[in-house]
Image (tube, coloured by chain):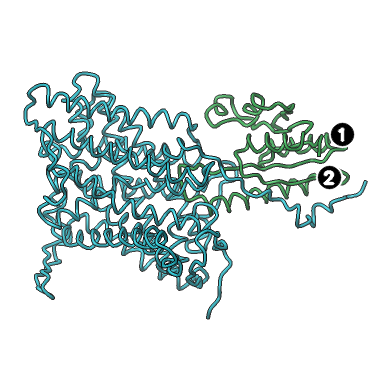
């Protein structure tokens, strides 16, 4: 017998080695679980509730609702931009397509540094709550030992992502279910005790807590929104992942709506219950370990550990949904020749972007240890700083959607509302929160800690009716804005030596439904 | 193509050993040898498009090299390299059922059982889930 098919030199084109990608079939429940687990409600509350009450006091529940609005609008941008690529794309790819390679590069950089900035907070909470779980309350407040455990946490989580260990879908549903049930029981018990017996410092909830119009200043509102945007961060995963769902006509919409209701419901109810129990001041004063401090008073002996466990499982989900997308964004940028090629390599045994993942883990540890050495409050400040990064790349996504589909916006009302107005409004709100927070956090007094950086920056001027004033800078501004700005020289340095990626030209969509030709790695439209 | 031999191939030493056995089997039964690489990114991480692209490139490199090696071992065996967008076990089962395969051939990794239990062992899962006979080729070491 001869070589009938002529292998191996010339495989016939119609029988090439690729069978094509089969989309993973995700059910409705797993879509919701992925969205909500990526948002990590228990960890988000533990990390930020005290910061929101610090900004707006008893109006925290209103911020929980209000901050969701821009997120919902941006989710619409994610939903429509996701159709551009046949599979889930990245903000980096979308912005490169819609606006251009330089803006796209900065959006990709925004994702990377945002993922980096959240790591110290995750590691800190994981370390702290692990000690609290075992009753080692002294060690939980010891900066060295919390840092030590936090580093081990990052190492383990990075290793899990490098090796590619995945929890089964059923385990994920179980863990997330437990997290939400525990939060709900916590809120129910706290409210029952507020109404049932006299608790020192307790308050009866009023409807006024839900009215954002009572927030005293726009600066406080902007800061609170930037913080609350952090708690909904990750929710968009439910929308993008849904493109792979079994029933693509129904599942994405239904899953997005249901995960929305779960999240907004949990955040509003828990924040109401938390501040009803001891007042807003208690939350602000315990912002480092707010859920544990409350849990001990609400549940008492032993039972409070359930909430600590919920925060830990939530933090582990959140750490994974930080490391995985960071590594994949780096991989994406590398495949498109926007950063060095090593970041795009796949480990042949583990089949993961091991190089990018390991680098991210190492940088996280350096960043975490560095911040821990400066002070504990800097870790809270980095949560505030996080808002800058999230607002930046979410806003870029919103603008990219409107610009990419600009020719289709006025075809019908549905396009205008969902593809045009919603993403644009979301992007504008986030841009406003971003800019206003620059003013807020340029004043060191508004930071969580008591540190002032760059004391030599001093000015006091009135320009066009706006009062510009600085007396040193607050750490959230320096971390949040500083890391974004560092991207500019890095991009220029890369651009000088590697022109290829920057020759991409912006495109626009002719149809809302047809997938665009892939932004082929390496294939470049040469215009000059 | 009923009666195909389906080989799971991931470029490891165990897979190389399995390839030798699979070529012999394909020759003995005068059957087509389907060389399969399966992968599917974890949806938890989102942003899978470029990751899938890189995985596909890697997988194509593996199966094409394996196909070349199979033809070198025995030029009379007809070989079909396949990259499937499913997790390894699902990819093998799906391909085997689709082709009414005679047998699925995989290599063992030579890892300790506890490592397999933590990382997930393809041969172990196949033995439990497959309705088609599975042949596990021992690791060369």
The quarter of the rendered structure image containing the C terminus of chain B is: top right
Q: Residue drawn at (12%, 38%), measured in percent from left and top?
A: A206
Chain identifier of the green chain: B
Question: In this view, which residue lies farthest toward the bottom?
Answer: A528
Few, some or many residues within 10 Å of mark 2 (<14, 14–19, 20+) = many
Q: Which residue is mark 2?
A: B78
State the count of labels.
2
Q: Which chain is home to disc 1?
A: B
Q: Quadrant of the image for the N terminus of chain B?
A: top right
Kindly report the distance in space between the C-alpha atoms of the residues bearing marks 1 and 2: 12 Å
> Any idea which chain is the cyan one in this picture?
A
Q: Position of residue B99 (x, y in %)?
A: 76, 37
Farthest residue to the front: give it: A412
Q: Is residue A186 left or right of residue A459?
A: right
**Residue B29: image tag:** 1
B90 displayed left or right of B1:
left
Is residue B103 placed above or below A438 in the rendered structure? above
Chain at numbered mark 2? B
Of residues A511 and A216, the one nearer the viewer is A511
Q: Position of residue A488 (x, y in %)?
A: 35, 67
Residue shown at 34% from the left, 39% from the top: A40
């Amino acid at each position: 017998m001869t070589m009938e098919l002529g292998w191996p030199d010339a495989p016939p084109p119609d029988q090439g080695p690729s069978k094509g990608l089969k989309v993973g079939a995700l059910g409705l429940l797993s879509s919701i679980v992925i969205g909500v687990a990526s948002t990590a409600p228990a960890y988000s509350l533990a990390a930020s509730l005290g910061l929101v009450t610090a900004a707006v006091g008893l109006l925290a529940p209103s911020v929980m609702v209000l901050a969701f609005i821009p997120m919902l609008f941006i989710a619409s941008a994610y939903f429509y931009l996701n159709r551009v690529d046949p599979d889930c794309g990245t903000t980096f790819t979308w912005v490169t397509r819609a606006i251009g390679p330089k803006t796209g590069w900065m959006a990709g950089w925004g994702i990377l540094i945002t993922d980096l900035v959240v790591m110290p907070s995750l590691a800190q909470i994981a370390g702290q709550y692990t000690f609290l779980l075992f009753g080692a309350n002294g060690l939980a407040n010891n900066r060295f030992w919390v840092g030590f455990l936090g580093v081990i946490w990052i190492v383990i989580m990075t290793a899990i992502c490098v090796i590619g260990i995945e929890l089964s879908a059923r385990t994920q549903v179980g863990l997330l279910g437990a997290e939400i049930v525990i939060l709900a029981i916590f809120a129910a018990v706290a409210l029952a005790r507020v109404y049932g017996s006299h608790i020192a410092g307790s308050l009866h909830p009023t409807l006024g807590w839900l009215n954002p119009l009572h927030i005293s200043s726009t600066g406080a509102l902007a800061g609170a929104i930037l913080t609350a945007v952090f708690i909904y961060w990750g929710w968009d995963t439910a929308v993008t992942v849904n493109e792979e769902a079994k029933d693509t006509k129904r599942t994405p919409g239904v899953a997005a709506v249901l995960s929305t209701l779960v999240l907004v419901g949990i955040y509003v109810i828990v924040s109401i219950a938390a501040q009803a129990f001891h007042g807003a001041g208690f939350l602000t004063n315990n912002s480092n370990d707010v859920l544990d401090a409350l849990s001990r008073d609400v549940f008492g002996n032993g039972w409070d550990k359930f909430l600590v466990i919920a925060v830990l499982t939530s933090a582990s989900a959140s750490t994974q949904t930080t490391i995985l997308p960071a590594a994949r964004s780096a991989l994406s940028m590398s495949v498109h020749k926007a950063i060095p090629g090593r970041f795009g390599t796949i480990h042949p045994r583990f089949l993961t972007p091991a190089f990018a993942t390991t680098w991210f883990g190492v940088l996280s540890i350096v960043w975490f240890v560095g911040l821990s050495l400066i002070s504990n409050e800097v870790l809270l400040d980095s949560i505030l700083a996080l808002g800058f990064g999230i607002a930046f790349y979410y806003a870029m996504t919103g603008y990219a959607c409107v610009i990419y589909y600009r020719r289709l916006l006025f075809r019908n009302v549905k396009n205008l509302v969902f593809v045009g107005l919603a993403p644009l409004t979301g992007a504008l709100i986030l841009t406003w929160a971003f800019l206003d927070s620059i003013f807020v956090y340029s004043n060191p007094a508004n930071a969580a800690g008591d540190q002032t950086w760059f004391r030599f920056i001093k000015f006091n001027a009135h320009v066009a009716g706006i009062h510009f004033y600085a007396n040193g800078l607050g750490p959230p501004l320096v971390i949040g804005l500083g890391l974004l700005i560092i991207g500019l020289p890095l991009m220029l340095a890369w651009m000088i030596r590697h022109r290829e990626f920057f020759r991409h030209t912006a495109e626009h969509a002719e149809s809302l439904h047809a997938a665009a030709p892939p932004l082929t790695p390496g294939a470049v439209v040469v215009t000059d | 193509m009923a009666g195909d031999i389906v080989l799971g191939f991931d470029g490891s030493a165990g897979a190389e050993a399995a390839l030798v056995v699979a070529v012999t089997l394909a020759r003995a039964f005068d059957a087509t040898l389907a060389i399969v690489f399966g992968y599917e990114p974890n949806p938890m991480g989102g942003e899978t498009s470029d990751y899938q692209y890189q995985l596909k490139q890697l997988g194509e490199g593996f199966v094409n090299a394996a196909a070349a090696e199979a033809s070198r071992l025995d030029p009379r065996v007809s070989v079909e390299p396949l990259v499937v967008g499913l997790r390894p076990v699902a990819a093998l089962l799906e391909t085997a059922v689709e082709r009414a395969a005679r047998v699925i051939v995989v290599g063992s990794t030579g890892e300790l059982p506890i490592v397999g239990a933590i990382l997930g062992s393809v041969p172990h899962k196949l033995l439990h889930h497959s309705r088609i006979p599975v042949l596990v080729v021992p690791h060369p070491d």
